[in-house]
Amino acid sequence: MVVKLALRDGTIREYPVAQRRGASYDRTGCGNQDCDHLECAIIHGKRMVSLQKLIQLASPFSSLLVLGIFVFTFNPLTDPSTRQISIPIILLIILLDVMVVFIFGKYAELNRKNVRELEEFRDQHTVNGIPAKQVTNQ
Ligand SMILES: [Zn+2]
């Protein structure tokens, strides 16, 4: 379920072609259960970037929704009995949101880098300027 590229400097780079779902994998870009097509790895990388960007974008909205429901339900602004516990919970929701945005931003960055490397290999047969060749999974 990976495209393996052997670089001339001896390193092996691996790029997934499909997302793992428990014990199995999603179908690859060509519709197979398993393959090592370069294009399928590029399609998968681009799909992951889109998904991770979407999660990154949706997280602040869902956090605002949760915050809104929380404030509406417990009304910490007017109810002094809930005020003390509300501040840590509100801070926790904001912290979780920042973590989700950061983590999925890192994943998206990693997948963008993978797509760039795969496209460079497809077009120039190099990875980061280093000559490379595709090796089989056996
Ligand atoms: Zn394929």
Image (tube, rainbow, N blue to C red):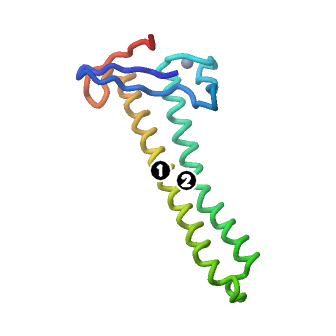
Type of the residue with mark 2: Gln
Measured as percent of width and height from the top left, residue 56 is found at 55, 53
Q: The C terminus lies in which quarter of the figure? A: top left
Q: Is residue 114 above or below residue 35?
A: below
Given residues 124 and 21, the one toward you in this image is: 21
* Residue at the image position 59 percent from the left and 50 percent from the top: 55
Q: Residue furthest left?
A: 9
Measured as percent of width and height from the top left, residue 73 is found at 76, 75
Given residues 78 and 84, the one toward you in this image is: 84
Mark 2: C-beta under 8 Å from nearest atom of ligand 1: no
Given residues 103 and 92, the one toward you in this image is: 92
Judge from the rendering whether residue 28 lies leftward or rightward of residue 110; answer left or right: right
Q: Is residue 33 above or below residue 71?
A: above
**Helix or strand or loop: what does disc 2 sit on?**
helix
| Pointer 1 local density, CA inside 10 Å: few below 14, some 14–19, many at least 20 | some
Judge from the rendering whether residue 3 lies leftward or rightward of residue 11; answer left or right: right
| Pointer 2 local density, CA inside 10 Å: few below 14, some 14–19, many at least 20 | many
Measured as percent of width and height from the top left, residue 106 is found at 44, 48
Judge from the rendering whether residue 10 lies leftward or rightward of residue 74; answer left or right: left
The circle on residue 56 is 2
Image label count: 2
* Residue at the image position 72 percent from the left and 81 percent from the top: 75
Labels 1 and 2: the sequence-earlier one: 2
The circle on residue 105 is 1
